[in-house]
Image (cartoon, rainbow, N blue to C red):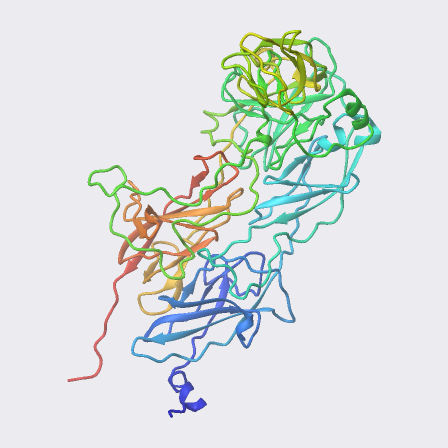
Amino acid sequence: MLVLTAAAQAAPSATHAAPTGLRAFLFRADEPLRHEFARTPSFAWRPVSGAARYEFELSTSNTFRDNGIILARRDLKTPVAAVALTLPWITGEPYSLYARVRGVFAKGGATRWSKPFGFNMRQAEVPKPLPSYPGLLRWTPVEGAAAYEVRFIDVPKSVFTYTNVVDQRELYTLHQGPLWISKVRWRIRTIRSDIGDSGVFRQNGVPVVQYGPWSPVYENVNPPFAVEPLNGLATVSDVVSTGKSTDRAHRLMPAFVFAGNQTFGGTAAELYRVYVFTDEDCINRVYSSAIIGSPAYAPRPLGPLQLPRDTAALAVARSGYLGDGDQGTTYTEDGEPVVPNESLPAAAPTAGLPAVSTTPGSSSPAQPGSAPAAGSGGVTFYTVGGEIGAPIDIWDTNWPQGGYYWTVVPVEAVSPPSLTSTVSEPGADIGATTVPLANAQGFATGDVIRVGNPSNEETVTVRGVNGNQLTLATALKVAHGIGEPVVRVSGNLIYRDLELAQDVCKQGRWLRFGKSSEPTLVTAGAPFASGLSPNGRLTAASAGSPLFYGAPLVAWTPALGADSYHVQWSKSRYPFRPRAVTTQGGTTEGILTLGTSAVLPLTPGTWWYRVRGISWNLPANAQFMGWSEPARIVVTKPRFRVSGGR
């Protein structure tokens, strides 16, 4: 029997010194040394002469016990590691997270493990209030936050948003007196995504909460509700715009602030709705808000307030706060049904890149490339789970040449009038739970209807409306033929605009604004790039054209509103022809990553790379954000030197 002693097992490593200089960083390996981070950093170390690859580990144990290992990489080709992994908030004295690395040689053997690099994960910064308007809360965006949770202390209730604004609809809706609206106490915390590196989460399963620390309790004071004609005041997000062409475009989906409560005719209202259009005539509508009672509207991804459906519920609602839910069928002034964007189904998140054509002469030819480098933190597709919410963002515009127009209209709650239609083809049999109508316009969920002639008449309740077909809460007891009358006897309250958006826009009640998603930054004087230099040293990019040997690590700033990132590289800046990446998932242009760094699998030559964010809060097929400016990087061929011999 062969028995290996401990000394014999350690011998291959004992002959080679461990890597040195292991450090964590956010942008470049030469930034000042730090040991605390609010988002997952990248790592770099001094290269080991002759090493063919590196093994890298992250652990909660400085002795790297098996049950402490969070991440283990065994095939890193250069002395850098991009980690697209959510790490837990964890602190220690001095540290609670540790990284180590060792070199492995082509002919066998490895160096000792490096000295552990200790660090902590802690979000010390919390959102802080920004100046705002009545009915609106606003705060400083926090870098890397995927969303925010706002807690209304006195309601009490938590709401979620992807922007840096939230309206106070709970306080104002159906009660606008000073007792309800004068003061709001609130606090806020960030929400981050729980992501896994290339689809693989933390190896030891250590849990990670998705929220940061709560802020202190903040207090906002609102003035008395303005009794005057309705008028738009401002569009508010990370910037404030008032309709001037010199205003900055909004990087986040904004809130809409207005004042007053009266129509142009002087009729007072306590409910309001905001519309967004692409034209100043207010015809081409691209966004419909939920109905609210506050003098500000900020989109929420998880649904609107549930409005009272009858007069008794309306009276009860005036003495309490409304919860979230379906607002029912609501209408414009001319009778068009309106579904608020907050009630739309979630858009399918962009979790993969479109395949590229390999046909010669195609507009986006697939060029020779490679799969994402091992440890790159990049993939060509991934799986998205959890509740994303309704698509409540809108498309980018070329501000100030292009932009949006928004207006606000008053809304009233009315009891539905009598309404008559007839049964259409093919009629309704005994036991049917649907009735086809010649015209179902105006019918709504909750309506009580009378179907049939006096000889076969019956009363049922509408459970849903789909086109010209009514779905019933109970099955029909008798058959009904084509042409038999259908009469609405009673129904839920109907919420209807008091003015037509087209008309109020003609009278000047609109504001213009621009929306332009934030591009990431990949350079600040020099690219955020680190890797192996041509002379075998760890280096970070300096001004000019950085030179690297092997695959460099590039990093970028988080873009406001981005959930993931798309990275591309090209041999030319213009035209930018992205290299194709081929994996089992297909051939795509570039890679996706959920982190803010990646290792690019570049061959020798001059390259240009760029990064853009992806927002799952935008409508489907429009979730890509603005590209960064391309950054130049040069990868050199290996240099050989003959030593010894004759």
| Residue situated in front as seen by the camera: 249 or 205 | 205
| Residue 636 in view | yes
| Residue 255 in the image: above or below residue 589 | above
Q: Which quadrant of the view contains residue 68?
A: bottom right
Q: Which of the image's four quarters has the N terminus?
A: bottom left
Query: Residue placed at 53% from the left, 36% from the top?
Result: 346
On the rendered structure, is 335 left or right of 551? right
| Residue 353 in the image: above or below residue 538 | above
Q: Which of the image's four quarters has the C terminus?
A: bottom left
On the rendered structure, is 11 left or right of 325? left
- Residue 207, position in %: x, y? 60, 60
Query: Residue placed at 77% from the left, 41% from the top?
Result: 156
Q: Residue furthest right?
A: 179
- Residue 155, position in %: x, y? 78, 38
- Residue 178, position in %: x, y? 83, 28
Q: Which quadrant of the view contains residue 287?
A: top right
Query: Residue placed at 25% from the left, 63% from the top?
Result: 637
Q: Residue furthest left?
A: 646
| Residue 511 in view | no
| Residue 410 in the image: above or below residue 532 | above
- Residue 472, position in %: x, y? 62, 23
Q: Which quadrant of the view contains residue 305?
A: top right
Q: How many marks?
A: 0
| Residue situated in front as seen by the camera: 220 or 177 | 177
